[in-house]
Image: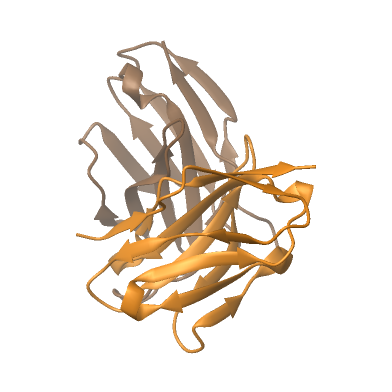
Chain colours: A brown, B orange
């Protein structure tokens, strides 16, 4: 059983550029959640995908978007990068079910994004 | 609104001493509660979780936590810390659609 993997590990972008981060979920999991962790802060929920559909979104602007593929891997896209987007981006996979049930999430190691 | 408060930003304990990290939550329904640990440059590892049942839950690495509904607390404890326990600890509450709300974390320092 493979764990959650993320790529790339580190990334440096310039303000105004676009970035795509990738996440492979744990085998058997159908749900991926993305979190942003700024330096010295706890992770903040960006959005979640369940069976290829967005299934909840946090307080992030529309320039943060995502996709989930039939194999349940996922991408996080951020357009028009701003300096404040510099953070560790974490994805977590879980076996999602009915709305209202919370399942254990398994986190990847994260992608460190630096915007200059 | 749902929230998690970890009142201690930093805690320092001596190796071998006992540890308690505090966590208070605000959530309207029965919460799902978690403690995660994060070592520098690493992702999050789940230490333990509370979904229902026994309010004292055991986790990995010798950690335990007690859910107290009347105090809206879920404090993490360990009877004897090891130098390898130095890390950042996050309390979190699970909400609708599996969204997890994290506290800001407590950095644990261990004195030799």
**Closest to the observer, A109 or B62:** B62
Q: Percent x, y for residue A95?
A: 48, 69
Going by the image, does A70 lie left or right of B1? right
Find residue A61 and report its image quarter. Answer: top left
Residue in the picture at 72% in, 68% down: B62
A101 is higher (above) or lower (below) than A43 = below
Quadrant of the image containing the C terminus of chain A: top left
**Closest to the observer, A26 or A111:** A111
Judged from this view, the residue extending furthest toward the bottom is B53
A41 is higher (above) or lower (below) than A114 = below
Q: Percent x, y for residue B45?
A: 61, 55
Residue in the picture at 64% in, 71% down: B59
Q: Percent x, y for residue A45?
A: 34, 48
Q: Percent x, y for residue B5?
A: 36, 54
Quadrant of the image containing the N terminus of chain A: bottom right
Residue in the picture at 57% in, 35% down: A7
Q: Is residue A71 visible?
A: no
Q: Is residue A116 visible?
A: yes
Going by the image, does B108 lie left or right of B84? left
**Closest to the observer, B30 or A32:** B30
B50 is higher (above) or lower (below) than A62 = below
**Closest to the observer, B28 or A88:** B28
Residue in the picture at 33% in, 29% down: A78
Number of residue marks: 0
């Amino acid at each position: 059983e493979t764990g959650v993997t993320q790529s790339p590990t580190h990334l440096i972008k310039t303000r105004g550029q676009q970035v795509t981060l990738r996440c492979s979920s744990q085998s058997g999991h159908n749900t991926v959640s993305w979190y942003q962790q700024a330096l010295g802060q706890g992770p903040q929920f960006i959005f979640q995908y369940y069976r290829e559909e967005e299934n909840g979104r946090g307080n992030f602007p529309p320039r943060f978007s995502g996709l989930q593929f039939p194999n349940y891997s996922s991408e996080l896209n951020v357009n028009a990068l701003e300096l404040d987007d510099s953070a560790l981006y974490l994805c977590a996979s879980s076996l999602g079910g009915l709305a209202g049930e919370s399942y254990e999430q398994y986190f990847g190691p994260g992608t460190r994004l630096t915007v200059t | 609104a749902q929230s998690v408060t970890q009142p201690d930003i930093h805690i320092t304990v001596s190796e071998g001493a006992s540890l308690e990290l505090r966590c208070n939550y605000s959530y309207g329904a029965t919460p799902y509660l978690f403690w995660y640990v994060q070592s520098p440059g690493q992702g999050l590892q789940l230490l333990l979780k509370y979904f229902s049942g026994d309010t004292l839950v055991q986790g990995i690495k010798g950690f335990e936590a007690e859910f107290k509904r009347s105090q809206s607390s879920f404090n993490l404890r360990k009877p004897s810390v090891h130098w390898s326990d130095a890390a950042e600890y996050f309390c979190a509450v699970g909400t609708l659609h599996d969204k997890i709300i994290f506290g800001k974390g407590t950095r644990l320092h261990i004195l030799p």
